[in-house]
Amino acid sequence: MDISSAFAAQTYAKARPATAPLPGEAGGSNSFVQLAGNFADTLARGDQTARAAMTGQASPHALVEALAASSLAVETAVTVRDKVVEAYQEILRMPV
């Protein structure tokens, strides 16, 4: 093995951890799963509060709070989706 290939291997070894999360840290996929779970929980709580309000078991104030939280969660998800689509379209427009 010559010096240039050894240098390339060392450089690759140093650069590789930058592309992957460190052990013990929350990785991108783990945090995305956690965010998706929080989103689903927020919507489920809003639905439960709405059902309780229809039967008279929850106050109108609690219903308004739950609907506002659900609305904010949906608006955030839509905004993130739009940004992802925009980034994807920008990548497709890049010259090869």
Image (cartoon, grey):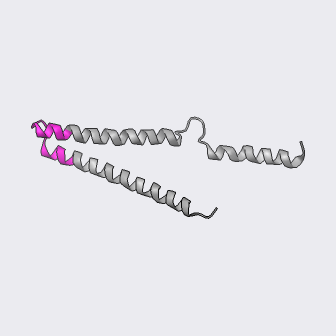
**Residue 59: within the magenta?**
yes
Q: Is residue 49 above or below residue 90?
A: above
Find the magenta span and give its range: 49-65
Q: Is residue 9 above or below residue 95?
A: above
> Where is the N terminus found, in terms of image quarters?
top right
Relative to the observer, which residue lies in front, 22 or 82?
82
Q: Where does residue 17 sit, x and y in percent of width and height?
A: 66, 43
Q: Is residue 55 left or right of residue 27?
A: left
**Rendered image quadrant of residue 9:** top right
**Rendered image quadrant of residue 16:** top right
Q: Is residue 78 above or below residue 6?
A: below
Q: Residue at x 17, y 38 (%)?
A: 51
Q: Is residue 89 left or right of residue 58?
A: right
**Residue 1: within the magenta?**
no
Secondary structure mostly seen in magenta is: helix
Q: Where does residue 95 sit, x and y in percent of width and height?
A: 62, 64
Q: Residue at x 19, y 39 (%)?
A: 49
Disc count in the image? Answer: 0
Q: Is residue 12 left or right of residue 59?
A: right
- In this view, the residue farthest toward the left is 56
> Where is the C terminus found, in terms of image quarters?
bottom right
Q: Residue at x 27, y 51 (%)?
A: 71
Q: Where does residue 3 sit, x and y in percent of width and height?
A: 88, 47
